[in-house]
Image (cartoon, grey):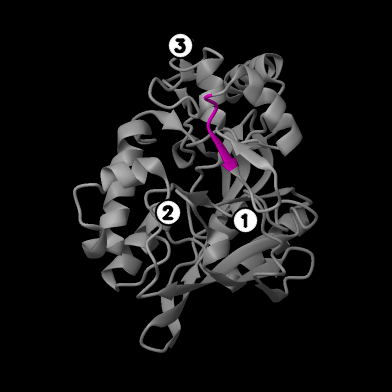
């Protein structure tokens, strides 16, 4: 049974560890508990905020509505032909736990997404990705409860309108649905994706013909641990900014004065740039403001060293965006959701 709590301190549920409270808080474990929580919000005329792992949020101030933490669990195989498997996972499952479980079952396809913080429910919403793999590559469908009606709907991968760190749930249907389950298509014989240079280097001591999905996962974990701070030790939300995508015309002009700029051609002809490289070259890597700053090993990561407010972190983020735009003419966009801005 879910218990409605008043004046709830969210700080420990947020990986940024900035101080934040909510007027009401409830944790739900089933679809029916979720519907009941939504009904409470309607009765009290409260704004609703859905919380998963708290890894992709920066609170600028306290929230005066109802925060619903979705803790719907479960990992259930619904089809298996001996090679390909479809598994349905509760939105509240920790993403990395699901990756490790999949590897234990010899299911391939998401090993490159190891150690990404957050819960399964956020994976299609953000279309999370790393080292050449995105959720779009393995998603089958999403089930979500409509806040307005309480009805359960299944969205196909096409319905989700996935893009780079985008989905229908972040765009025209934002705030209308609560994701409760996600189905993934995994493959015991999926081809290993080691196209990124860092992965190739990390796996160079293993013969190409002997590498496994677990080898790739282990390599990704080592790389991420070497560059990214543990949120339990140093408050952060992972990559704070999206990698910007610009036209080939703009890129060719930019490359004239920056011939060594990392770039990744996209299927539509546009060019993806490395936001971390731009921030680093603009002089922000390791920037220290006492309570907060930019991580010394990864310029994409803003950190709360203790005592920083969300507004202070956001002020730093804005200065970084202005600096990069002034130096390179490239506009950065935050990947982290801003709450109360």
| Segment colored magenta | 260-264
Mark positioned earlier in the residue sequence (3 or 1): 1
Residue 37 relative to residue 197: left or right: right
Q: Is residue 242 above or below residue 277?
A: below
Label 1 sits on residue = 125
Residue 129 percent location from the top left of the image: 51, 51
Hey, which quadrant is residue 109 in on the image? Answer: bottom left
Name the dominant secondary structure of the magenta segment: loop
Residue at x 67% of width, y 24% of height: 254
Task: Between residue 10 and residue 264, name the one nearer to us.
Answer: 264
Residue 318 in sight: no
Task: Assign a secondary structure to mark 2.
Answer: helix
Q: Which numbered disc covers residue 113?
A: 2
Is residue 191 found inside the magenta-colored segment of the image? no
Residue 83 percent location from the top left of the image: 37, 83
In 3D space, how far apart are the residues under numbered discs 1 and 2 (Cα atoms)? Answer: 15 Å
Residue 22 in sight: yes
Label 3 sits on residue = 288
Residue 268 relative to residue 228: left or right: right
């Amino acid at each position: 049974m879910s218990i409605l709590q008043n004046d709830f301190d969210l700080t420990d549920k947020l990986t940024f560890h900035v101080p934040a409270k909510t007027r009401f808080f409830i944790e739900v474990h089933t679809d029916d508990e979720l519907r009941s929580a939504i009904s409470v919000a309607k009765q009290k005329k409260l704004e609703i905020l859905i919380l998963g792992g708290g890894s992709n949020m920066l609170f600028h101030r306290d929230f005066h509505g109802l925060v619903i933490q979705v803790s719907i669990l479960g990992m259930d195989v619904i089809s298996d032909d001996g090679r390909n498997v479809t598994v349905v996972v509760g939105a509240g499952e920790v993403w990395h736990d699901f990756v490790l479980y999949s590897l234990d079952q010899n299911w391939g396809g998401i090993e490159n997404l190891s150690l990404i913080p957050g819960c399964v429910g956020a994976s299609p919403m953000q279309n999370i990705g790393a080292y050449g793999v995105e959720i779009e590559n393995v998603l089958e469908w999403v089930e979500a409860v409509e806040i307005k009606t309480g009805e359960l709907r299944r969205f196909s991968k096409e319905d989700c309108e996935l893009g780079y760190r985008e989905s229908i749930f972040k765009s025209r249907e934002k705030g209308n649905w609560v994701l409760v389950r996600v189905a993934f298509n995994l493959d015991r014989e999926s081809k290993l994706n080691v196209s990124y240079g860092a992965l190739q280097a990390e796996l160079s001591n293993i013969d190409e013909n002997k590498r496994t999905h677990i080898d790739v996962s282990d390599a990704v974990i080592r790389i991420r641990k070497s560059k990214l701070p543990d949120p339990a030790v140093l408050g952060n939300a992972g990559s704070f900014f999206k990698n910007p995508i610009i036209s080939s015309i703009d890129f060719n002009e930019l490359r004239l004065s920056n011939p060594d700029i990392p770039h990744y051609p996209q299927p539509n002809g546009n060019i993806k740039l490395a936001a971390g490289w731009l921030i680093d070259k603009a002089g922000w890597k390791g920037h220290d403001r006492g309570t907060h700053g930019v991580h010394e090993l990864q310029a994409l990561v803003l950190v709360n060293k203790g005592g920083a407010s969300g507004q202070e972190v956001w002020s730093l983020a804005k200065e970084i965006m202005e600096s990069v735009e002034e130096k390179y003419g490239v506009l950065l966009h935050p990947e982290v959701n801003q709450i109360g801005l």
